[in-house]
Image: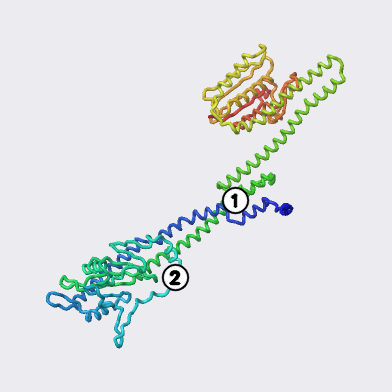
Amino acid sequence: MPDDSASLPRPAPPTSSKVERRRTRRFSPLLRRILLVNAVPPALLAASLLYLDQYQNGLLAAEVEALRTQARIYAGAIAEAAVRIEGDRAILVPDQARPLLRRLVEPSPNTQARLFDSSGVMVADSRVREGPGGAVTSEPLPPPEPRGPLTSTVANVYDRLVSVLPAPLRGGAGGDGVAVTVGPEAPDFDWQPDLGPDRREELRLALEGGVRPYIRRTGDGRLLVSVAEPARRGGQSVGIVLLTREAREVDQRLFEIRASVLLLFGTALVLTVMLSFYLARTIATPMLDLARSTQRIREGEGREESVPEPLLARNDEIGTLARDLQNSARALWARIDANERFAADVAHELRNPLTSVRSALETLRRVENPDSRNRLLAIIAEDAVRMDRLIADISDSSRVDAELSRTISAPVDIAPILSALAELHEATRAEDDAPSVSLETEPGALVVRGVEGRIVQVFRNLLGNALSFSPRGGKVTVKARPTGAVVEVAIEDQGPGIPEQKLESIFERFYSERPSGERFGQHSGLGLSISKQIIEGLRGRISAENRRDAAGKVLGARFVVRLPAA
């Protein structure tokens, strides 16, 4: 069965402009990172302050100590006023203890008092009253005060935050030996003799005053503190007073502090978000602008001004990056233009010998004279040698930049290089009146950073150029000296000099200004151009000038090379 989907038109891939618009609609990754980095510290601070364990334990310890003092007062009053003495024994009188206990608890509406006898049976409860007709009524602890809408919202947020905290951090051991138990399973001190040996042991400890206070939070969120104190008469325990108080002030203080922390955190978070957006606007947006500028450069747009002017005017790292990008773009366009001119020059220079060879071959077909044929064959051979030299120099010129970019510069001592070139020329002079080479160096290190083979090529080209323009019996002088952070080498000849209007163009590709009498085609015109490429690739400078006497007469040409010292 044929696949119908193959015949359906497929959606075109999104263009770069669509991708760019889609990218700008979202938050940039840099903005997300800025928000995360800026929001984490205040969030961690707020989370750490939500615990407030030490402060909470201090409040609870103070609450326990106050309740314990109150329980001791109650126990002492009951032991004195609600006990009868039978022989050497003190016996608790429940009918006297009940109204006394209620009178003692009346000033503390949030406190519930229970009284147990020495056997663990509860005999009085401040919240249990006898109504008309002997009816028994129980009064629960008063409900907490209602909160406003804002307070309730903050409380709900706080409760949810506290509910997700690790359990050990929501409870624990308070100061001064206070046991903190969370939940309705906290002990209620409701001792009965038939509840087993554990409760009997707890009863014994309570009668001796050894039961630790209990702090528990009920299912409806109330924080209750319970303290048990024995009532003693004459060193004998007659009962146990159990006080339970709702620690509303502790919760209220903790709530106020945590609400302040949450409010400060919310304010800090809003400021952090605003500052993050500002920071992203000053960093992420310019980076996107630079990315778009790079895209325009890649697509061939914005050749003159590829980077927006506001980015170039910034006095920060982004401005430096923008200016470097603009300079790189200009250098790239200049390199493209240079390659285009180079290709045109290569085509032009190769066309001349090829035209000469074609003409010689066409003439060779029609000429039968052996001497004429030999001359035409000699012309073809010379043009072939010329093309071979031209192609070799073109290849060398095209490799210079790539080679220098791959090669690591190293310290090179140019003193032995110049000395070897001078000695080599003197040893190979074919005639006595041929120009000589003199080397003059000043004291100091002549060590530069570069590539030794390419430096040798530069000085060989300059020295050969100076010798070719020097007259018979003339002299070429090579002077080398250190000058601060650079090493300067000057090569002087006694030739006719350089036309003033040609002092810069002599370094252009395929420029040839040869001395009179020299055969045409002996040089490709790339020697000085390659030398300039090498020197500039090594972060140096090369220049040409004329030597003159006091009267302004030209005495010869001078080429000066300056390379950074190692």
The residue depicted at 69 percent of the width and 15 percent of the height is 472
Q: Is residue 497 above or below residue 47?
A: above
Q: Position of residue 213 (x, y in %)?
A: 28, 67
The residue depicted at 52 percent of the width and 25 percent of the height is 445
Q: Quadrant of residue 230?
A: bottom left
Q: Quadrant of residue 177?
A: bottom left
Q: Quadrant of residue 234?
A: bottom left
Q: Secondary structure at mark 2?
A: helix
Q: Is residue 339 left or right of residue 132?
A: right
Q: Is residue 345 above or below residue 422?
A: below
According to the picture, the residue beneath numbered tag 1 turns out to be: 286
Q: Along the line of sight, which residue is nearer the eye, 117 or 547?
A: 117
The residue depicted at 16 percent of the width and 70 percent of the height is 235
Q: Position of residue 366 (x, y in %)?
A: 87, 20
Q: Along the line of sight, which residue is nearer the eye, 146 or 346?
A: 146
The residue depicted at 23 percent of the width and 71 percent of the height is 72
Q: Secondary structure at mark 1?
A: helix
Q: CA distance from mark 2 to mark 1?
A: 44 Å
| Residue most extreme to the front | 1
Estimate how packed mark 1 is, as few (under 14), some (14 to 19) or many (20 or more) residues with alpha carbons within 10 Å: some
According to the picture, the residue beneath numbered tag 2 turns out to be: 151
Residue type, numbered disc 1: Pro
Q: Position of residue 22 (x, y in %)?
A: 63, 55
Q: Position of residue 42 (x, y in %)?
A: 45, 57
Q: Is residue 171 left or right of residue 534?
A: left
Q: Is residue 304 above or below residue 417?
A: below
